Image (cartoon, grey):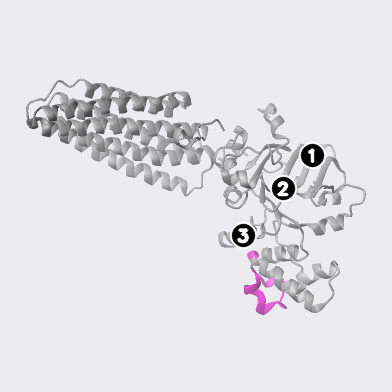
Amino acid sequence: MSHFEQELADLKDTLLRMASLAKDVVNKSVKALIERDDELARAVKEEDNAIDELEILVDEKSVLLLSKAPLANDLRLITVALKTSHDLERVGDEATTIARRAIELGKEPQLKDYIDIPRMTNMAMEMLDDALDAFVTADVNKAKAIVPRDKEVDALNKQMQRELAGYMVEDPKNITRCLHLMTISKSLERVADHAKNIAEEVVFLYEGRDIRHAANLGTDQQS
Amino acid sequence: MSEPQATTPMTRPTVQNRETETDADADADAVAPLIEVEGLSLHYGDAQALKNISVSIREKVVTAFIGPSGCGKSTLLRCFNRMNDLIDNVRIEGRVAIGGEDIHGPGVDPIELRKQVGMVFQRSNPFPKSIHENIAYALRLHGMRDKDALDQAIETSLKQAALWDEVKDRLHTSALGLSGGQQQRLCIARAIAIKPSILLMDEPASALDPIATARIEDLALELKNDFTIVIVTHNMQQAARISDDTAFFYLGELIEFNATSRIFTNPSHKQTEDYVTGRFG
């Protein structure tokens, strides 16, 4: 392996370390919500700082590698790393939002059983897992299959928003808790969006084809 | 060749079958081919340097030839103005047409051909004469005698070669007193003074520092408004910066010919990918 290839491998490793932390904080933040565990919620914030540091590290490494004028798949890997690091950093941010809201919700009795939130979490986490797996194994088909799953998470979020609006109409005392839960639901929906973004980046990385906004732009064709 | 079958669809990468993806590329496709190579093979004695090359080079764009040393890119470049005629023991099969005319046709005078197809080499080669005389010599050789016309043509070509401002006060001093980059631009001025339609550049910046290189690259981009440029380069980034189309050669074969944007971001062939990323070559 050349020195340059070693540096590219390091970049990939850093990105995967970041991904593993991002998954961890989302899982912890939802666990903190369900188990009403303030301490765990506060730990999420700490871990998010580590993700932020890794984002800066990935970006620094990427810019340094770009200065060496890479081409073709090397060039694509670096641009993908820059974008993916941003997506993962945002996943970390969503987890801190969930954790903050979990702490607030912990101050009041639980509004209802949490059924859809763990479901959304699982769906989003599976999407993220698959996107990272596709990245590591260069499995473009796996990456492509992630994209439509985002719609299912969107639908679940919409359902949550409607249901919570119902609770608010029912009793104004529910409003604060409902708003917290609406934010959490929206955050999980955003996590799935970031997983979808990463999946699209993986397709670009290995196929050199941009599938983003394909339906809207009418660009969803084989080159 | 690990992918011999890969060359089959690529041996005739005409303007029509270049794989293009963007609107910009589609627009570029409207440009007509100026140089058409069909089934070109070249042997130096027993050694085959070019193997059944077919390629269409578009008018007024910059086409880069890339590939490891010995891949045949310079040999092909030298076919375009029949420079290989000057080497003993060369055998050429196939057809090279410029503007539709076979350059090996019976009525073709190689001297006239070279007037139409100018060339700039890796090492600048100004004559050991004044700057003025370097260009005047080429013009006189092609029949220009009138002093005013000569002066005008020299000024025009030096301006086109982005050298005029640096040398206008010392036109009658020795060309050998110029810097390497200036000498190379003088050679370009000399080549374009006689108004060729094609300018061949064989690693024109490989002996220059980055600033002089940048000037040559800028110049190539300016000159493509008036000339069809084919450049051989070992510098991938240079090819990426200045060329519209890129052809990758390996062991005498044309492996891939495509829009430069495609070659350097997402080449179709693994060998191209491996070469442009420095994995082999």
The numbered disc on residue B32 is 2
**Where does residue A36 sit, x and y in percent of width and height?**
12, 26
Task: Work out whether mark 3 precedes mark 2 in sequence or the reverse, and give the earlier one.
Answer: 2
- Measured as percent of width and height from the top left, residue A123 is found at 31, 23
Going 30% across and 38% down the picture, which residue do you hit? A90
Would you say residue A107 sits in the magenta stretch? no
| Residue in the picture at 77% in, 59% down | B196
* Residue type, mark 1 in image: Glu
Do the dots labelled 3 and 1 sit on one chain? yes
A105 sits left or right of B263 in the view = left
Which of the labelled discs sits on residue B208, or is there none?
Answer: 3
Q: What's the CA distance linking mark 3 and mark 2?
A: 33 Å
- Residue that appears at 78% across and 42% down: B37
N-terminal-most mark, 2 or 1: 2
Observer able to see residue B75: no
State the separation of the CA atoms marked 2 and 1: 16 Å
Question: Within 10 Å of the Cα at label 2, are there few (<14), some (14-19), or many (20+) other Cα atoms?
Answer: some
Q: Residues within 10 Å of mark 3 (few under 14, many from 20)?
A: some
Query: Does residue B3 sit above or below A213 in this rendering?
Result: above
**Residue visible at 76% across and 38% down in the picture:** B53
In depth, the one of B127 and A88 nearer the eye is A88
Label 3, secondary structure: give it: loop
Q: Is residue B8 left or right of residue A221?
A: right
Q: Nearer the viewer, mark 3 or mark 1?
A: 1
Give the magenta-colored segment's residue range.
B163-181
Q: Main secondary structure of the magenta part?
A: helix
**Which numbered disc, 2 or 1, marks the residue closer to the eye?**
2
- Per the rendering, the mark at residue B38 is 1
Q: Distance between the Cα atoms at labels 3 and 1?
A: 34 Å
